[in-house]
Amino acid sequence: MKFFVDTAIIDDIKELNDYGLLDGVTTNPSLIAKSGRDFKEVIAEICGVVDGPVSAEVAAMDYDGMVAEADHLSKIAKNVVIKLPLTLDGLKTCRYLTDKGIDTNVTLCFSPNQALLAAKAGATYISPFLGRLDDLSLDGMELIRDIRVIYDNYAFDTQILAASIRSANHVKEAALAGADVATIPPAVIKSLAKHVLTDKGLDQFAKDWAATGQSIL
Ligand code: E4P
């Protein structure tokens, strides 16, 4: 499973990239607003840090506007992936960009049929939003499982990018359900390394090692 980080905060991206844990980055207009930075500047900076795909989302709602913005954004760096909303105009733009050889991430997917349309439009990634479905007491993970079956039935090569991930359990369940990628907030990525028994075991090893009075170097 590939790990993308879901943030526009450059220090968090650098830290996770230094651990060797990052395959890519996703952003959205809310994350850009939260960063308080210029959109195109921050995308350029992220692309300078991470070699993998960096999703940058269009703001236009209509086909002509999305094509114009995508053209602009894709010139920022070769690893920019154009993020498009799951609307009819977004799907039309997806087909246009795919035919031009530009990678796309179709976002705000909440149903298997939407995911089927994105695959037919040639999307590189489909982003089903788990957490937002769970927030409504629906089963976000069932959506991932359904998309996996549909994509496998027809050998679509659109990658399932599990999004709106809120917890370590979401990451585990998405991996079990066969998501190709998870885009995860920085704190959740770091939390995956934590286990109370790891901490307890390490404390004990440190005490026992100190008692030997030895040094490795
Ligand atoms: C994905 O690309 C989105 O940016 C993100 O996962 C949305 O997550 P949220 O529902 O926590 O805002």
Image (tube, rainbow, N blue to C red):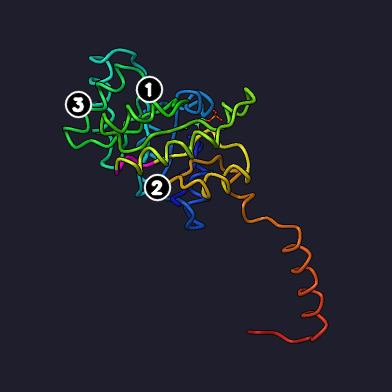
> In the rendered image of this protein, does residue 38 appear above or below residue 101?
above
* Residue reaching furthest to the left: 100
> In the rendered image of this protein, does residue 141 appear above or below residue 216?
above
Q: Tell me the CA gap for discs 3 and 1.
A: 14 Å
Q: Tell me the CA gap for discs 2 and 1.
A: 26 Å
Q: Main secondary structure of the magenta part?
A: loop
Span highlighted in magenta in the image: 155-159
Query: Badge 3: how crowded within 10 Å, few (<14), some, or many (20+)?
Result: some
Q: Secondary structure at mark 2?
A: helix
Q: Three-letter amino acid code at disc 1?
A: Pro
Instruction: Look at mark 3 in the image and give the residue it sits on.
Output: 96
Cβ of mark 1 under 8 Å from ligand 1: the answer is no
Q: Three-letter amino acid code at disc 2?
A: Val
**Residue 110 position in % (x across, y down):** 47, 25
Instruction: Look at mark 2 in the image and give the residue it sits on.
Output: 49
Label for residue 85?
Answer: 1
